[in-house]
Amino acid sequence: MTVRIYSTPVRSFEELGADWRALEAEVPGRSFFQSWSWVGCLAEERYPDPVLLRAEAEGRTLGLALFNRRQGRLCLAESGDAALDAPFIEHNAPLSLGDDIRRGLLRAAWGVAGARRLVLSGVAPEVLHAAGGTALRLQARPAPLVDLGAVRTAGGDYLATRSANTRYQLRRSARFYAAGGEVLLQRAADAAEALDWFDALLRLHESTWRERGGAGAFATPFLQRFHRSLIAQGASRGEVDMLRVTAGEQEVGYLYNLRLAGRVFAYQSGLDHAGAGTHGKPGLTCHAMAVQRALEMGDAIYDFLAGADQYKRSLATGSEPMVWAELLPVWSPLGMAARLRRLVLR
């Protein structure tokens, strides 16, 4: 079978979305960040100069990779504009039926007109290696996770897998919240309720970040439009879990989780730190309850996404590496200079 990989203009994001969804259905183990729900969200705004690479054989689409071309950079599933890329992407990769197709799509990116650099954000190391090139900029971050299959194999008691200190913190927090009433985790029933709960999450999220002197993850009108669009579409497809934890009449917190193919991605949260007192741990409590829900739902992984926050390390059973890189052609002058610099630093 001869595979043809070629670049084609994007004349209609609606048509591309239909092709993308069709291929999605054939790709096992894809991440939410490879889905059209994410890649296609506000696509007209996020990809002002889109470049689509398509892999085909015998009239069948085997792979798709959407880039945006910006100032000589070809950015995978991103725009190259920091404001538009603030919805943080992870588990990023071309959508493909097999590693060879993925490698072919990434290598073909070097041949796109005007592309002097390749930007790969939030990719696994094997995706980075498949692209070739020399790293001008490279950052690796761990993505802590809970291997739910391993928890089930060990007897299904998630709390028993955590350290004595984490168990103590969780139990003390549970007692604190239970004093105010029954502690419940609920999932928004539909897209409308998910959007209502997102408003409540925003209020708590922004309050926390104001106290820290920061802006938070939803600080611009674009970010809020992006996530409202994502939630409206994703909730109706069962790809967004907007979760609320309450203790009697008290809000403990909200979790904005994404899900696909047995993997839950803990994307953002809004937590009531002001009402937590000395002993309440809203983040630990909400995520521990969400992990338990994922266990009961039969999911495979609860993914905390990249970052070394203490709560992630406390609740995770392992981690996977994630890489952010800007690549240069191997034999370009800058590429050779970057390799030489690395050798000198070693």
Image: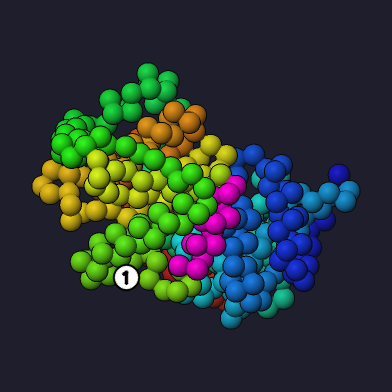
Look at the image and tell me whether residue 316 can be seen. Answer: no
Magenta residue span? 224-237
Query: Where residue 148 sits: x, y (%)?
Result: 43, 31
Q: Nearer the viewer, residue 66 or 333?
A: 66
The residue sitting at the bottom extreme is 71
Q: How many numbered marks have been drawn onto this rendered protein structure?
A: 1
Label 1: element kind: loop
Q: Nearer the viewer, residue 228 or 281?
A: 228
The residue sitting at the top extreme is 155
Name the residue at 50% across, 62% down.
228
Prevailing secondary structure of the magenta residues: helix
Task: Answer whether residue 235 is magenta in the image.
Answer: yes
Query: Where residue 337 sits: x, y (%)?
Result: 50, 73
Q: Nearer the viewer, residue 183 or 67?
A: 183
Quarter of the image with the C terminus in it: bottom left
Quarter of the image with the N terminus in it: top right
Looking at the image, residue 195 lies above or below residue 171: below
Task: Answer whether residue 256 is magenta in the image.
Answer: no
In the picture provided, is 289 more to the left or to the right than 84?
left
Question: Badge 1: how crowded within 10 Å, few (<14), some, or many (20+)?
Answer: some
* Mark 1 lies on residue: 215
Looking at the image, residue 292 lies above or below residue 93: above
In the picture provided, is 149 more to the left or to the right than 6?
left
Look at the image and tell me whether residue 167 can be seen. Answer: yes
**Applied colour scheme:** rainbow
Name the residue at 76% across, 62% down.
15
Name the residue at 61% across, 52% down.
35
